[in-house]
Amino acid sequence: MKTRRLTMAQALIGFLKNQFVERDGIQNPFFGGCFGIFGHGNVAGVGEALQENPDFRYYQCRNEQAMVHTASAYAKMSNRLRTIACTTSIGPGATNMLSGAALATVNRLPVLLLPGDIFAKRKVAPVLQQLESEHTQDISVNDCFRPVSRYWDRIYRPEQLITALPEAMRVLTSPADTGAVTLALPQDTQTEAFDYPRELFEKRIWVIPRNRPDASLVNKALEWIRAAKRPLIIAGGGVHYSEANEILAQIAQATGIPVGETQAGKGSLHYQHPQSVGAIGVTGTSAANILAESADLVIGVGTRYSDFTTASKTAFQAPEVRFININAAEFDAFKHNAIPLVGDARVILAELHQNLAGWNVGSGYADKIEKLRTDWDNEVERLYNLGHQPLLSQSEVVGAVNTFSAPTDVMVCAAGSLPGDLHKLWRTRDPRGYHLEYGYSCMGYEIAGGLGVKMAAPEKEVYVLLGDGSYLMMSTEIVTSIQEGCKLIIVLLDNHGYASIGGLSAACGSQGFGTRYKYRDSRGSISGKDLPIDYAANASSLGAISLRAKNLDELKAALATARDQDRTTVIVVETDIDERVPGYNSWWDVAVAEVSSIKSVQDARKKYEESVQKERYFL
C-alpha cells in the first residue's frame, strides 16, 4: 500500500479538500474552506496544515461563536450541499463554539467543528486551560460538545483519523441526521506524523439520495387526502433543502390545498401564489391560523412541528384532524401519530401530485382561502403604512426594506421581535430570499449569518435586519465582512432595549422588567434615562459606512445610498419599542408565575390557565 507521511493535521486538511457531494448528477466540493482562530491548542497543528494547503482557503474571524454561525448560514444558503469547517484552540476558544454547535444541530445544518484538545500524553498535565477531574483523566471541556453534536469523536492517535473522517462525512451529508460534527484534536496528536494510505486523499463523492417511502403508506396518504374536506399543507425547511419549491407550487395550484409556512419554510411559495396563506403558528397570519384551526388533514412537509409552528399544540382544533408527514427524518415523520412518508420531499410530492390528478378541494373551501388571503394582504398594507409618530414602527421598517429590496435579494434575521414581524409581514418573492435562524433563536447570529449567506451567494444583495440587543452581542463580524469584501446592508433598529422579551414580560404581567437600556436611578432600579449608545459611531469604528434615518423618507434614502456602496453599510433607525404587530388567532405557552404579589401577574396567570386548556395530544 502506498502511503504519505503526514502529520495528523496535514492529513485532516488533505482529506477535507477532496470531499465532494453529488445530487441529481451535479457535483461540488463540500467544504468551502476553514474558519479559524489560533491558540496554543491548534496553531502548530491545524494552523500549520492550513498554511501548507493554500488551495483550502483559510478565513480569519473575530469570534468563535460567530464563525460557526457563518458556517451554518453558508450551509443553509447552499441547501446543505456545502459547508465550512471551524477550528479553535482548546479552552475558551473551543467552548465559545458551543452555542454555534447547538444552533447547527437544532436547525439540522452541517458544520464541522475542529477544536484543539488537551495533550493525549498525560505527562505534562495539567496544561493551560485544562479542566481537571478527580473522577477521570479522560475528559476535557470539549466533552461539552457531546449533547449538541450529531457525531463526536476525540482523536487520540493519528491513525484514528482514517476511520473517524468517513463517519464524520456520513453524518454531515445525511439528509436526516446532519448537524454539528465535532472532532476533538489533542494538540500533541495534531503534530504527530503517520504513514497514511494514499487512498484517503483521493477524490471522494458523497451522493445525497432522494429516498422514496413505502408504497402502501403513499396509497394510504392518497386516500386520506381525497377524503379531506379542509386539508392544509405546512411547508417547513425540508421544502428548501430538497429543492421541492416548484413541485409544491404545482400540487397546491392543482389541488387548491392552502400552504402555510414555518420560519424555515417561508419562501416555499411566492407570496402571490393563490394557495399561499403565509406564516403559520405563533407568529402566523390570520389566514393560515384560521385555516389551521378547522383543518381536518394537515400535511407537514419537512417540518419538525416546533411549538411556534403548532402554537404550543393549540393550532389544530378540529376533533377529527389527522396528519401526514413527509420528512427525510423518521423521527419527525412519525410525530402527531401521522402517516410517516419517510424520504425526499421533492420525489414524494411529485408522486402525490401525479396520483391526485383531477382532485381538488371544494369550491366553498376555495372561496374561503381566497377571502382570507385578501384580508391578510390588506392587513399587511395597513402595517406597512401606519404613519406612526414620532418614531417609526417596526412594521414600517420591515415594509420599507421589503418594498425597496429586489426579488432575488436575501433578508437575514434571527432573534428578538423582528422574526415574528418578518414571518408575518415579509412578502417572499424568491425561495432563498428569506433567511431566518429560528430553531435556536440565537441573538448574535444576524451579522455572522449574513456574512455566511454572502459567501455562499456573492452575487446577491444581503440585508441584515437586527435589533440593538443582537448588535451589542456580536457586531464584530462587520470587520470580517470588510476584510473578505463581503458587502452587507445592515439595518439596525434602535429601540433602547430587548423589544421581544419586553413584550413577553408584559404579557406575563412582569411589566417589561429588566428589558430596557437605561441608567440605574436613585432608587437602585434600572429605569432612569436611556443609555447614550451611538451605534453608527460604533459601526464606523469597525470599518463600515454608517447612515442614520429618523423617518420613512430618510430610511428609503439611506437604503438607496447603501445599495450603491462597495462595502458593508449600517443604517441605524430608531423605532418605537411599544408599537407592536399584533398576534393573529394564536397563542404561545410561556408559563406564568402561579403565585405572585403583583396584580398584573395574577391577571396574566388567569388568562394563562384558560388558554392552556386548548393544548392537545395527537395520539
Image (cartoon, rainbow, N blue to C red):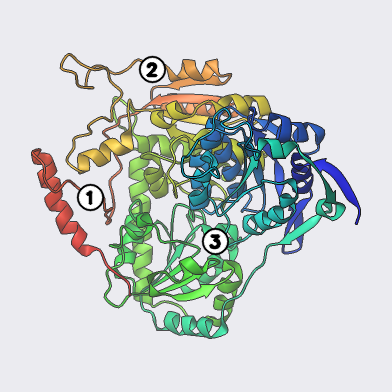
Q: Earlier in the sequence, mark 2 or mark 1?
A: 2
Which residue, given by chain and number where applicable, does mark 1 sit on?
A: 591
Identify the residue shown where x is 33% and y is 53%: 282
Question: Dividing the image into 4 quarters, which one contains the C terminus?
Answer: bottom left
Element on which disc 3 rests: helix
Residue at the right extreme of this rendering: 2
3D distance between C-alphas at marks 3 and 1 = 32 Å
Marks 2 and 1 sit apart, C-alpha to C-alpha, by 33 Å
Q: Is residue 19 visible?
A: yes
Tell me the element at label 1. Answer: loop
Residue in the foreground of this view, choosing between 593 and 377: 593
Q: Earlier in the sequence, mark 3 or mark 1?
A: 3
Q: Is residue 507 above or below residue 479?
A: below
Q: Disc 3 residue type?
A: Val
Q: Amino acid at mark 1?
A: Ala
Q: 358 or 480, which is in the foreground? A: 480
> Nearer the observer, disc 3 or disc 1?
1
| Labels 2, 1: front one | 1
What residue is shown at x 43% (from left), y 26% (from top)? 472
- Within-10-Å neighbours for mark 2: few <14, some 14–19, many 20+: few
Tell me the residue that label 3 is attached to.
239
Q: Secondary structure at mark 2?
A: loop
Q: Amino acid at mark 2?
A: Ile
Q: Is residue 185 above or below residue 153?
A: above
**For mark 2, what is the residue?**
533
Q: Earlier in the sequence, mark 2 or mark 3?
A: 3
Residue 370 location, x and y as percent? Answer: 38, 64
